[in-house]
Image: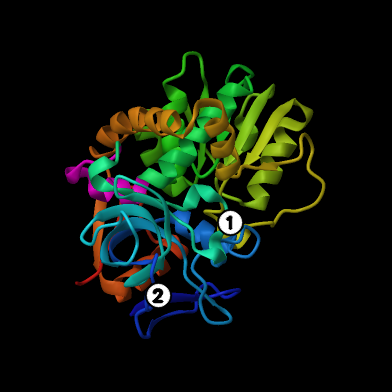
Amino acid sequence: MSDFLVKKGELRECRVAESEPPAIEVGQALLRVESFGMTANNVTYAVMGEAMSYWDFFPAADGWGRVPVWGFATVERSEASGVEEGTRIYGYLPPSSHLAVTPVSVDGGSFVDGSPHRAALPSAYHRYLATEADPFYAADTEDMQMLLRPLFFTSFLIDDQLADEGLVERGPIVISSASSKTAIAAAFLLARRQGVELVGLTSPRNAEFVAGLGIYDRTVTYDAIDSLERGPATYVDFSGDGAVRQAVHSHYGEDLTHSMAVGVTHWEDFGSGGGDLPGPKPSFFFAPTRVTKRTEDWGRGELEQRVAEAWHPFCEWTGGWLETIPGQGLEGARSAYLDVLEGRVDPRTAHVITLGA
């Protein structure tokens, strides 16, 4: 078994380690990881690993962690009723060659991992979907699913919450790190709503790309925040950059209707620019909480169907401009992770990792 490991607290230190594959017992199955995406979303998992318990999904040796990824795997061995060997699944995986799971709530080959160590963790990450029964799945869009599906789910929930709370009707939605994939997905959905005004904040380097997407009404660089018209507005922060957050709050002051903290694409600046913030206190958006609410409101099946219906046009649109960068093996994963961590990835591209048999 091979693992890509990152040192907690020192995210640039990482390595590939070898060990014996996990033994499985009655009621368990062994998944062989085939492929996964590597984006800023995974960096957020690492940065928030302790605070949001992301390290706890796939425990590693003391001081080290497995950064969670989204991708495809095949059931290599199974001692679990209803889970057949050879079943191909999509879900939340470690950057490892194998994962032992304890399938429960098995339905058509799909299942929930009931491993005891995951019991206290958010249930939104526990479900593994057999590709044959997955409403999102299309064989020709696997790369897009690995890269963008988890981000899109988050973006769908952000769009849903902003609309549900009436914020889309109360001034512009100002989005930081507007070139990030999760921000783009959220803007794509918000732009489909009537009367929504979207402002994309970005770096000078990415300004042309952001403007060219055609989903933001206005593209503004971080050094020009004071050029924005004052008045009611909502801030959706995908960057986690404290200095940018301070600039936005200071500019809008008490007119700022809501401040939503989503990601940390500017991970080294997370928490910088501290001090008292004018306007509302930022509230951290935690997707599993929104999943729980909408599951209670609509039912899990209805939620997944709504997300799938919104996903397909986004996937088609993104396929027209997003270029994938293929990587091979866990050394390829290491290289891709460091590129993302250091901000070396062009917003028009994204890394997809394929593991050997």
* Residue matched to label 2: 4
Quadrant for the N terminus, please. bottom left
The image shows a total of numbered marks equal to: 2
Residue type marked 2: Phe
Residue type marked 1: Leu
SS at mark 1? Answer: loop
- Which residue sits at x=36%, y=45%? 148
User: Which residue appears farthest toward the right when viewing the image?
Assistant: 276
Q: Position of residue 208 (x, y in %)?
A: 38, 39
Q: Quadrant of residue 352?
A: bottom left
* Residue matched to label 1: 121
Height in image: 20 above or below 216? below
Q: Quadrant of residue 226?
A: top right
State which region is magenta: 136-148
- Which residue sits at x=71%, y=29%? 256
Dominant secondary structure, magenta: helix
The residue mark sitting in front, 2 or 1, is 1
SS at mark 2? Answer: strand
User: Which callout, 2 or 1, points at the residue further toward the start of the chain?
Assistant: 2
Q: Is residue 171 magenta?
A: no
Q: How is the image coloured?
A: rainbow
Tell me whether the residue at label 2 lies in contact with that at label 1, contact meaning CB atoms closer than 8 angstroms: no
Q: Position of residue 115 (x, y in %)?
A: 49, 63
At label 2, counting other C-alpha atoms closer than 10 Å, the crowd grade (few under 14, some 14-19, many 20 or more) is: many
Residue 82 visible within the image: yes
Q: Judge from the rendering whether residue 208 lies leftward or rightward of residue 273; answer left or right.
A: left
Residue 95 visible within the image: no
